[in-house]
Image (cartoon, helix red, strand yellow):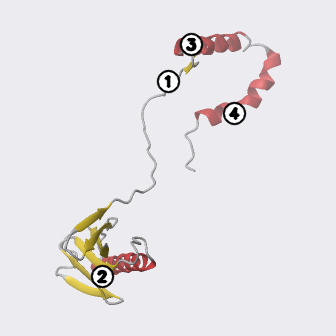
C-alpha cells in the first residue's frame, strides 16, 4: 500500500530562484530547484486529493507569486503530476484527467441527414439548390413596395447573422 504522495511541478525560467530553495509546509518537505518543485506528503487511505494536498498546492502557487513580484518577471507554473511511493521503494504514477474544451477552427461544416436505412434525406446539393431558389424568389419580389417594410424590419436579424459571435 502506498504510504507517500509525491507532487512534482515544472516551471519556466529554471534560474528564477537562482539557487535551490528548501522549505516545509506543516513539516512536509518542499524543494524548488532547476525548474522543478517536489513536495512529499503522507497518503492516508489512498486519498490522492486530500485537503493537505490542496493546501500544499496553494502554498507552492503563493511562493511563485512572491518570487514573480520580487524578480519583476513572469513565470509559468505547470499543473502538478502525482505519484505514490511505497515502503519497498516502488513508485506508482497517477494519471489525473481534466475537463477541457476542444475547438476546431476551419471552414464550414457540411452535415447530411441520413435515415437508419441509409437513405440520405438532405444532401449538400439539395441545400444549395434550396438556398438558391429562395434567394432568387426573394430577389424577384425585392422591388415590390409591399415588401419594403418587411426588409426594414429584418435588417437587424440579418445583421445579427453576419456579426461575429460574442464570447460566452
Q: Is residue 94 above or below residue 161?
A: below
Numbered tag placed on residue 157 in the rendering? 4
Q: Which residue is mark 2?
A: 70
Q: Residue furthest bottom?
A: 27
Q: Is residue 153 visible?
A: yes
Q: Nearer the viewer, mark 4 or mark 3?
A: 3
Q: Nearer the viewer, mark 1 or mark 4?
A: 1
Q: Earlier in the sequence, mark 2 or mark 1?
A: 2
Q: Nearer the viewer, mark 3 or mark 1?
A: 3
Which residue is at 17% across, 73% downward?
34
Q: Which residue is mark 1?
A: 110
Element marked by disc 2 = helix
Q: Nearer the viewer, mark 3 or mark 2?
A: 3
Could you give the CA–CA distance between mark 3 and mark 1, rounded to whole angstroms?
Answer: 17 Å
Q: Earlier in the sequence, mark 2 or mark 4?
A: 2
Determine crowd level at label 4: few under 14, some 14-19, many 20+ residues with C-alpha closer than 10 A.
few
Amino acid at each position: 500500500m502506498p504510504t507517500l504522495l509525491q507532487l512534482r511541478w515544472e516551471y519556466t525560467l529554471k534560474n528564477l530562484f537562482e539557487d535551490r530553495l528548501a522549505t516545509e509546509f506543516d513539516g512536509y518537505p518542499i524543494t524548488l530547484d532547476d525548474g522543478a518543485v517536489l513536495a512529499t506528503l503522507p497518503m492516508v487511505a489512498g486519498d490522492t486529493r486530500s485537503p493537505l494536498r490542496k493546501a500544499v498546492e496553494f502554498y507552492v502557487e503563493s511562493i511563485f507569486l512572491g518570487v514573480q513580484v520580487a524578480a519583476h518577471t513572469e513565470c509559468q507554473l505547470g499543473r502538478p503530476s502525482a505519484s505514490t511511493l511505497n515502503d519497498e521503494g516502488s513508485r506508482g504514477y497517477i494519471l489525473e484527467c481534466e475537463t477541457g474544451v476542444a475547438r476546431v477552427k476551419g471552414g464550414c461544416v457540411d452535415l447530411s441527414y441520413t435515415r437508419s436505412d441509409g437513405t440520405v434525406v438532405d444532401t449538400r446539393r439539395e441545400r444549395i439548390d434550396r438556398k438558391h431558389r429562395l434567394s432568387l424568389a426573394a430577389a424577384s419580389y425585392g422591388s415590390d413596395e409591399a415588401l419594403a417594410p418587411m426588409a426594414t424590419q429584418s435588417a437587424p436579424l440579418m445583421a445579427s447573422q453576419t456579426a461575429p459571435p460574442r464570447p460566452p
